[in-house]
Image: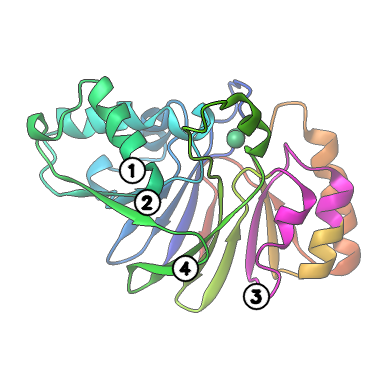
Amino acid sequence: MLELIFIGTGSAIESLNRFHSSFFIQTTEYNLLIDAGDCVSKALLKQKINYHSIDGIIFTHFHPDHFSGFGGLIIQMEFLQREKPLQIFTHYKLIPFVKNYLHLSYLFEKNISFDIEFIGFNHNEVFCVCDKIQVKSKSNMHIDAYKKYDEDNKIFFSSSSFLFNLKGKKLFYTGDIGTKDDLYLFSEEKIDYMITEITHISIEDILEAVKFLQPSRLYLTHISDDDGETIEKIINQTSAFDVPTIEAVDGMKIII
Ligand SMILES: [Zn+2]
Ligand SMILES: [Zn+2]
């Protein structure tokens, strides 16, 4: 059995109702966390997910609402004397950044109880997390606007949308996106589950993409407290083209 769990469905705006972005893919052989937003340790605790059960973490990008819980989660694993290695998946050019972040947080590989294995991926290439989880990353436009601030050209800007192949079922995880074109990054695929953020994209653009892509099911996430009306509009209008649409909430599960 394969279980997908929304750990945090909030946007970057703080909320008492939702944790920040994080999503969990649970299989019999491997458990993968997608993003580790602010307070992810608490969010996992709330869903009764044992930190040791996490085999790997994959990052879409490094905005704090997707990343800043990472250091705290490593500390929790250390407190619990984890022994099993932890795998970190990120674009291969960003591995030095993640290592630096850990070192600057005083989390040195030699001083913690478990190994951290860094596994770099490249965009547009399929890679296997385990037998049941294959991933393809594509670069989206979410952070492109920041390039103008990097005058020395030192930063590698990369924000991923993912297509997960889960035992033959295709899951399109938009991550945070930048333009409506990002919704079509995997348009050549027959998408079973589409999980889209709703913060950086208009209702009209979501509807147009969903009508074209025809996923079997659409899940809305990255939600702020005042998004109720937006969600209602999307849910009402996707029913016109027979795409069942669900507002994700923290703890919601998809069984595959
Ligand atoms: Zn975000
Ligand atoms: Zn973001």
Q: For the residue labelled by badge 4, is the local secondary structure a helix, a strand or a loop?
A: loop
Residue 183 is situated, as x and y percent measured from the top left of the image, at 72, 57
Count of labels in the image? 4
When the figure is inspected, residue 109 is found, relative to residue 141, above or below; the finding is above
Q: Position of residue 9 (x, y in %)?
A: 58, 39
In the rendered image, residue 201 lying in the magenta stretch gets the answer yes
Q: Quadrant of residue 81?
A: top left
Q: Earlier in the sequence, mark 2 or mark 3?
A: 2
Identity of the residue drawn at 87% across and 59% down:
208
Q: Which mark is residue 92?
A: 2
**Which residue is at 29% across, 48% downward?**
54
In the image, the residue with mark 1 has its CB under 8 Å from the nearest atom of ligand 2 = no
Q: Which residue is mark 1?
A: 95
Mark 1: few, some, or many residues within 10 Å (few <14, many ≥20)?
Answer: some
Q: Which mark is residue 189?
A: 3
Q: Residue tagged by mark 4?
A: 125
Q: Earlier in the sequence, mark 4 or mark 2?
A: 2
Query: What type is the residue that disc 4 sits on?
Result: Glu
**Distance from Cα at disc 2 to Cα at disc 3:** 25 Å
Pointer 3: residues within 10 angstroms few (<14), some, or many (20+)?
some
Q: Quadrant of the N terminus?
A: bottom left
Label 1 near label 2: C-beta < 8 Å?
Answer: yes
Mark 2 Cα-neighbour bin, 10 Å: few <14, some 14–19, many ≥20? few
Q: Is residue 256 visible?
A: no
